[in-house]
Image: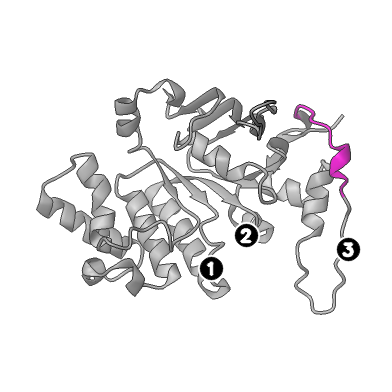
Amino acid sequence: MTPLVDVKHLVKEYPGRGNWFRKSAPVRAVDDISFSIAPGETFGLVGESGCGKTTTGRCLLRLIEPTSGEIRVKDMDVRALSAAALRRARRHFQIVFQDPYSSLNPRMRVGDIVEEPLIIHRLGSREERRVRVRELFELVGLDSAATAKYPHEFSGGQRQRIGLARALALEPSLVVADEPVSALDVSVQAQVVNLLLDLQKRLGLTYLFIAHDLRLVRQICDRVAVMYRGRLVELAPAERVFAAPAHPYTAALLSAIPKLQPGQKLERIPFDGDRFQALPLREVEPGHWAAVT
């Protein structure tokens, strides 16, 4: 099957902290990573804070410019697109941001927020756009009569649904979900996750799901890539990652998952980051790759 997303040797560097007298080496937030995502797949990208997950997702959409590497989405060379071509191509890939409180303009009515992508891409008449906005609100489980309200009149879970409606307005093939439930109450997280899964089935969506909640990743992702210090250290079907982690960092990460049974002791596996070696991925078993010797 031809992948919907194909990333090869992606690198993102930021300038180091230097001064007038000495320049420091650039910081590699993403360090030579490669992966692909099949149509209809939920591909999980996990790791601790600061490992490069969000940077990878934003490079994929060119919300930030990669330093080097190749990114192909739907056979488009994303890095080669001009500004105008990239604007047109963004109909095919959208993002749901982590924080539903800062990702919506507080001065705009929520109906206008969801309609904005349609206006930018000059789709439909004003009345057709308004009809589409009402359809999108109903699609994500919101009352279509609420389009005249402002973001502050909604809860966090409802705001994330509005962000999702905005992302779906252009009927994208790929949605980058950047920790879409981490800022929500636990009671609301399950509702939003179930909505994401339902929309995937109904609309044939492909997800790059960025998260640090490993239990959630195990529940919804088909394959999982584990990042550490900007590099991929493991990539495999979700069940293989959780059942038989091949990289010591993955094993350490999984050992930190809280136990569900009261009183059950958490047996942490230590990982010495000072001894980390940046090794290329190799196939340890069919479909299971790890950066090990």
Q: Nearer the viewer, residue 139 or 108?
A: 108
Q: How crowded is mark 3: few (under 14 residues within 10 Å), some or many (20 or more)?
A: few
Mark 2 crowdedness (10 Å alpha carbons): few <14, some 14-19, many ≥20: some
Alpha-carbon distance for marks 2 and 1?
Answer: 9 Å
Label total for image = 3
Q: What residue is pinned by disc 3?
A: 267
From the image, give the main secondary structure of the stretch colored magenta: loop
Q: Position of residue 78 (x, y in %)?
A: 44, 26
Residue at the spot of label 1: 190
* Looking at the image, residue 132 lies above or below residue 266: above
| Alpha carbons under labels 3 and 2: distance apart | 20 Å
Q: Which of marks 3 and 1 is nearer the N terminus?
A: 1
The magenta stretch is 271-281
Q: In which quarter of the image is the C terminus?
A: top right
Front one among 155 and 258? 155
Label 3 vs 2, first from the N-terminus: 2
| Residue drawn at point x = 28 percent, y = 68 percent | 150
Picture coordinates of residue 91 (x, y %)? 32, 38
Residue drawn 27% across the image and 46% down it: 117
Residue 160 position, x and y percent, is 42, 62
Depicted 165 relative to depicted 286: above or below: below
* SS class, disc 2: helix
